[in-house]
Image (cartoon, rainbow, N blue to C red):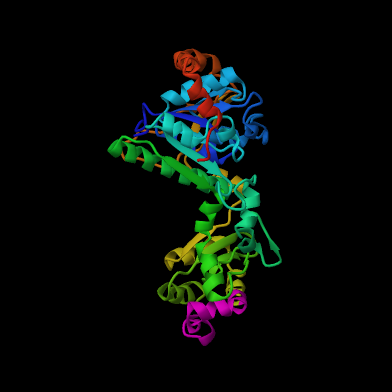
């Protein structure tokens, strides 16, 4: 089923994480993705050297794409890019706010010229409003959206350890593009998808927002403890390996007290009788749980939790995650050799396995793509001067 988008051409002026994430999902679904890079390349190529001397971010997000180097400020390269867009089904960009419009590649103008084209603009804060022109990166948006305020230990905020704002925007862009392709199947017309990092995680911040605006106080940072449910968090077994446990309802609380803590008298104790009471008296509750868990080995604790049908999981290191028995991996070819990565999370019943997709070297496909799309580029070059002027004065989208 990984060829569902076969025959779909995606042209993406992308960098960093959000745009490449969206186009990577399209490539995984069978689309042909032509990644347009500046002469110096997507700056994510230089983020680190962890993957055989290559950027871990770039290897993760650019499998199965073609890399073409174009400087769209150069008139000849701009004509090549116009030739690409003329044949494209989808055009994605997540460059600095306004840069594509000023260069003559504003999404509104492109759709007027190519009515079946689907455009996707990914920005930090949207294209309007007081932050519309601000540059934005993941950690900055985490701070602006209050994510850091609800993440970390009580004494200090923290950054979520992965690029959650970028990933959220990339996922929403991917979903929006799929919806636009379905709409085009029905109407024959393209459409414009607009996604911002801030909007995406603002939606995910709905629960803290509702607590603050209507409840009078946002959930406080609690480290590995859930702010609204108790017991729900990490506890040490035998003073060593930490174990996460989660109690979701009163039936589980009763089994936890009776079979795991082996203190059935706690079930109806006033200070722990309901979830709200347990949250209010979390410090005392944690002391009771900690005293029991301290005496148990990890294996004995896990045996009790499993027998009581209580949800639990180990607090693993990244090294332990990398060796996790449930982890599925897939091979990717890169200019520096083969690398294994976590497999695509989307699975189909009738799919044999994920295909090996190559990570492109910078400009690896420039010559071939120029040759393939040369006729379209020449057509753009020979187009009317009036049309060229209209593109040069691209209007606001």
Q: Quadrant of residue 52?
A: top right
Viewer-proximal residue, 46 or 7?
7
Q: Main secondary structure of the magenta part?
A: helix
- Which quadrant of the rendered structure holds the N terminus? top left
Viewer-proximal residue, 50 or 136?
136
Looking at the image, the residue that sits furthest to the left is: 186
Q: Position of residue 111 (x, y in %)?
A: 43, 33
Residue 385 position (above or below residue 108): above
Q: Position of residue 187 (x, y in %)?
A: 29, 38
Residue 262 position (above or below residue 310): below
Residue beneath the point at 64% across and 62% down:
149
Q: Position of residue 176 (x, y in %)?
A: 42, 44
Q: Position of residue 279 (x, y in %)?
A: 55, 76
Viewer-proximal residue, 276 or 301?
276
Residue 283 position (above or below residue 36): below
Please state if 45 lies on the left or on the right of 188 as rendered: right
Looking at the image, the residue that sits furthest to the bottom is: 270
Question: Would you say residue 264 sits in the magenta stretch?
Answer: yes
Residue 345 visible (yes or no):
no
Residue stretch in magenta: 263-287
Residue beneath the point at 43% across and 29% down:
113
């Amino acid at each position: 089923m990984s060829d569902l988008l076969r025959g779909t051409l995606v042209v993406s002026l992308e960098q960093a994480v959000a745009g490449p994430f969206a186009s990577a999902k399209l490539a995984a679904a069978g689309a042909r993705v032509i990644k347009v890079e500046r002469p110096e390349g997507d700056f994510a190529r230089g983020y680190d050297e962890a993957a055989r001397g290559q950027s871990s971010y770039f290897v993760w997000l650019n499998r199965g794409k073609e890399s073409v180097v174009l400087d769209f400020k150069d008139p000849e390269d701009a004509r090549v890019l116009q030739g690409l867009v003329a044949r494209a089904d989808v055009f994605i960009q997540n460059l600095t706010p306004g840069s594509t419009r000023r260069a003559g590649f504003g999404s509104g103008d492109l759709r007027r010229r190519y009515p079946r084209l689907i455009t996707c603009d990914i920005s930090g804060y949207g294209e309007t409003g007081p932050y519309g022109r601000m540059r934005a990166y993941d950690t900055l948006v985490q701070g602006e959206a209050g994510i850091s305020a609800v993440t970390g230990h009580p004494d200090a905020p923290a950054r979520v350890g992965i690029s959650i704002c970028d990933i959220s925007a990339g996922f929403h862009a991917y979903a929006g593009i799929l919806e636009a392709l379905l709409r085009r199947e029905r109407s024959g017309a393209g459409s414009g998808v607009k996604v911002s990092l801030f909007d995406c995680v603002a939606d995910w911040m709905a629960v803290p927002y509702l607590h603050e605006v209507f409840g009078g106080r946002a959930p406080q940072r609690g480290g590995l403890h859930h702010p609204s449910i108790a017991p729900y968090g990490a506890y040490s077994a035998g003073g060593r390996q930490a174990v996460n446990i989660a109690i979701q309802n009163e039936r589980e609380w009763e089994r936890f007290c009776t079979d795991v803590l082996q203190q059935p008298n706690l079930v109806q104790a006033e200070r722990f009788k309901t979830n709200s009471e347990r949250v209010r008296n979390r410090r005392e509750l944690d002391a009771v749980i900690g005293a029991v868990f301290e005496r148990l080995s990890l294996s004995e604790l896990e045996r009790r939790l499993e027998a009581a049908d209580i949800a639990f999981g180990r607090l693993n290191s990244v090294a332990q995650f990398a060796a996790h028995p449930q982890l599925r991996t897939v091979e990717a070819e890169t200019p520096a050799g083969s690398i294994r990565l976590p497999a695509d999370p989307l699975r189909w019943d009738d799919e044999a396995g994920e295909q090996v997709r190559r990570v492109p070297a910078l400009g690896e496909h420039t010559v071939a793509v120029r040759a393939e799309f040369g006729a379209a580029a020449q057509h753009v070059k020979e187009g009317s001067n009036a049309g060229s002027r209209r593109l040069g004065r691209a209007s606001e989208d």
